[in-house]
Image (spheres, rainbow, N blue to C red):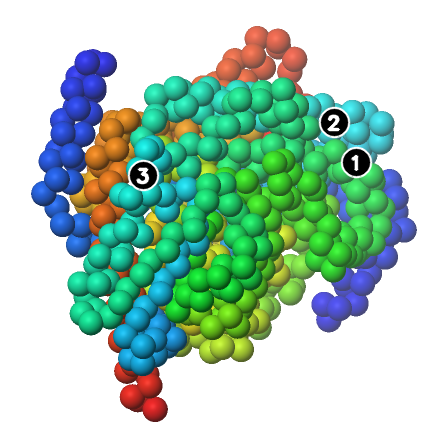
Amino acid sequence: MRTLWLALAGVFACVGTALAQTGDCTEAAALVHADAGLSRAAAAIASRHELKVLVSGSASSILAGPGGTRAAYPVTLQSALSKRLPGVAVSVVNTAKPRQTAAEMLATFGQVLAEQKPDLVIWQTGTVDAMRAIDVDQFRAALEKGVDQLRAGGADVMLMNMQYSPRTESMIAADTYAEIMRGVALREEIPIFDRLAVMKAWNDEGTFDLSTTTKNSEMAEQVHVCIGRLLADLVVEAVDFAKEAKQGK
Amino acid sequence: MDQPRSALTQSADAAAPPLRDGAHGASAAVAAKRDVRLDLFRGLALWLIFLDHIPSNAVSWVTIRNYGFSDATEIFVFISGYTAAFVYGRAMHERGFVLATARVLRRAWQIYAAHIFLFMIYMAEIAYVAGSFDNPLYAEEMGILDFLKQPDVTLVQALLLKFKPAGMDILPLYIILLVGFPPLLWLLQRLPVVALAASVTLYALSWQFDWNMPAYPSGEWVFNPFAWQLIFVFGAWCALGGSERLAPLVRSPATQGLAVAYLLFAFLITLTWYFPRYGHYVPRWLADFMYPIDKMNLDPLRFAHFLALAVLTVRFIPRDWPPLKSELLRPLVLCGQHSLEIFCLGVFLAFAGHFFLVEVSDRLTAQVLVSALGIAAMIATAWLLSWYKRAEGRASGSGPKQPDADLAGGEA
């Protein structure tokens, strides 16, 4: 019986991997849409033909292992954005560090703003807060303060929540913290990349088998490529959103 | 007409410390008969908690948390308060304060042991995951397993009820509520209004001054006992005559209308959570007023939602509602009668179910299968426990059994 289950699991895993290799990860595209604009990014593109993006995040914005950063989603984001925005000099700087809570990232914003002067900050957070069970009010307060500070420093902000991780799902209360991030994005009228929902959709659709125990980094890299592409779509959509809003006025 | 009568009842209660001698004797006799509705709805709450505890379970769409502000936790805590007052109130009345206190504490100890048992199961699952899972995509998430590296700290924090894995927060709340219960019960039997007022005051103070219990590694209790005691004490108050006092209010058409309106309002608001594009129909001032709806501190919106549900439930399901005796509802009632065992089983089954979904298949059919099998296991266990209890009762030949602390109107 056990062998049968294992065999079945094996079949599922193979099918999952096969799909991952052929799929173009657009199954979840419907979950990525801009409900708010990026007006400063739009202005930078229009006036300076330049877009400086900064990714502030934790370990899930970096891939583990040697050379991981080179395969992480910010790299794809840069190439995809350059392709989508011809004639615009796109730069993506990744300042992600492992084990950082929202409050700890917040503390670095002053320096980062001064040094990098980004037009757009993609703030990936929530995972470490959920793992450490940070007080939800403190988490919300850190998010709101961070968004205010980044805006005051002249940058647009886009939030990105946590990865969908089926194996640790019963141990990390990701949903609670993801919900808070969606709420903050709605109230502050900033776009959010709902990575949790997107990756869950991939898992449900069979695009990626996210519960596989592989030690191989191949799937991880593909997931990051897909995230980078969809993220670029969202940035472009939010820039267009801001342009339309401006024309509307 | 109603006003003077309820005032009279109140003063009669206050003036008669040996509870329910005299004028209240009749209602005590009625209360002594088990109110099957309590078992029924606690059983239902246990099923819903089980379904909600399986992560990414499509079947949990049927649970009430998706259709309003409150969820099964409110039902569970309210009924627990109700039955605790019912069972230990009688013990305190008949055997005195000290013995009743001892019984309450023994119960709290049982729940503590059950909680630690569940924690062991959780540790076993975690340790397994830590040993088998090494996907580079989740290097960060695997950090949750770091506490395995320092069991000295983790285990002590768990024994102190400060380290509580996700989804294991209700029993610690229940333990704290029971430990504080004896003096409260004493007061409830003498000055019920004062006891209820004290509870509301504590609730208000906890909101005002952010009182909560500390948790490990950071943060505070997911169910703040200082806030959640309100619904437990309210349940206890209802059990000791409060529900009779509230009856005219509950039956009034105005209250009924208000309850329906509020449930409808909550339903529409929850819809906007699942269909964010309708979120723009919620006016800004209303959103600012409502959000965040604070589960940790039993948000008044949640409490009100529970009250509205309760008002309509009491109205449409009377104590002698015929289907309560039907075989169809018997599984729910059985589960509700063995709430501690079935609750623990539910938490374990949720772990096991999640394990199955991750290891074998997480397709929709697997989710439905896991949910159905889990509930079947809960029913079978409850049935077995009832059978055992009956068989033991017969074997000891002790005649008509006294309603004991573990099984009178369900467990406390």
Q: Which chain carries label 2?
A: B
Relative depth, front residue between B332 and B133: B133
Which residue in the structure is indicated by mark 3? A68
Label 1 to label 3: alpha-carbon separation: 59 Å
Q: What element carries label 3?
A: helix
Q: In this view, does B322 lie above or below B352?
A: below
* Discs 1/3, front: 3
Label 2 to label 1: alpha-carbon separation: 9 Å
Residue B96's spot in the image, x, y percent? 85, 29
Asked which quadrant contains residue A189, the reply is: bottom left
Q: Horizontal placement of B33 versus B2: left or right?
A: left
Which residue in the structure is indicated by mark 2? B105
Q: Mark 3 lies on which chain?
A: A
- Asked whether disc 2 touches disc 1, contact meaning CB atoms under 8 Å apart, the reply is yes
Using the rendered image of the protein, determine whether residue B297 is visible from the camera's viewpoint. yes
* Discs 2/3, front: 3
- Mark 2: few, some, or many residues within 10 Å (few <14, many ≥20)? some
The amino acid pointed to by label 1 is Pro
Which residue in the structure is indicated by mark 1? B182
Q: Which residue is drawn at 86% across and 40% down?
A: B18
Q: In which quarter of the image is the N terminus of chain B?
A: bottom right
Q: What element carries label 1?
A: helix
